[in-house]
Image (cartoon, rainbow, N blue to C red):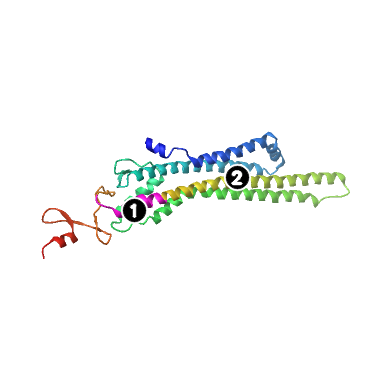
Amino acid sequence: MRLLEREFPNDHLPLLRWLMFTGVSAFGFVVAWHYGLFQLMLASDKTHISAIIAVLYVAATAHCFVRTAAISRETDSAHRVFALLRRDTTGLRLAGDDVTTADGARLPVGQITGHIRNLILKAGLQGNHRLDQTLLLRGLADALRGPNQLGSFASDALMKLGLLGTIIGFILMLAPIAGLDAADRASVKSSMGLMSDGMAVAMYTTLSGLVGSILLQTQYYMLDGATAKLFALATDLTEVFVVSVLDRAPPGIAREDGRAAPLAREDGRNAPLVAGEDGQRRTSAELRRISPP
């Protein structure tokens, strides 16, 4: 484990990037609060749409934090699996729900290890056919990227709420014009105040929706990039160190039932072993070559 710690330190790079970006954003929010901009926005927005946008932004940011932490853990686990398989590519075995290498090292728990376990089970159940992991990779991609789709929905929802606030603000701004009496100064003054309130609603909701949507899209963009790198690492890892070993399946490579794989025939497929007269186990082709005519 010390070797693994040295080769792949537990740095959680995607999470650190998210924390850096969120820290800068939080600093900007604190500055805006210090100068009273948030208080002015909340007081001027009579529809409270800006407050709703702020609450949704905080909730979506919390979800992005949870997903980023999960992807960081999976990336760290995948790097450790890569280190273990690179040191020992002679075989993989199943020990209950765990996957172990030939020297007994247990692969770290995670979705990548679960994918490798499914590959071992599939290789054992399908027999001598070529191992194709396309469907399993699609399932892994859906499991990794599926929860991230909330980010696009949340950023789009913030944008639409901002546009809704804009429409409501213009309605509030133009409504007093219908009953405006140009000769009545009090009526004109009251109408101007209502129009100013409507314009404030339109501007503040649009501003909050745009800022929230841009910040959320940036967070989930970084999350999608980290997820794509994790999936690429999983694909390379399994194609090079797992699928190739299970397809080759030389004697001594353990399958899911713990038995050694059969020998390979000249056409690339596995051939059963048959006991000869001398007691040694050979393939049928070898017995035909050495048997007398």
Where is residue 96? Give x, y as percent: 31, 43
Circle number at residue 244: 1
Where is residue 152? Give x, y as percent: 56, 50
- Between 44 and 216, the one nearer to me in the picture: 216
- The residues bearing labels 1 and 2 have C-alpha atoms spaced at a distance of 43 Å
Q: Residues within 10 Å of mark 1 (few under 14, many from 20)?
A: some
Figure quadrant of the N terminus: top left
- Between 72 and 149, the one nearer to me in the picture: 72
Residue at 47% x, 44% y: name it: 71
1 vs 2, front mark: 1
- Of the image marks 1 and 2, the number of the one nearer the N terminus: 2
Amino acid type of the residue tagged 1 in the rendering: Ser
- Visible in this render: residue 233? yes
Circle number at residue 215: 2
Q: Let me know if residue 243 is in the magenta part.
A: yes
Q: Residues within 10 Å of mark 2 (few under 14, many from 20)?
A: some
Residue at 62% x, 36% y: name it: 27
Q: Magenta residues?
A: 235-251
* Quarter-of-image position of residue 127: bottom left
Where is residue 237? Give x, y as percent: 39, 49
Main SS class of the magenta portion in the image: helix
Secondary structure under tag 2 reads helix
- Visible in this render: residue 98? no
Left or right of 252, for residue 135: right
Residue furthest to the top = 34
Left or right of 284, for residue 156: right
Q: Is residue 59 above or below residue 283?
A: above
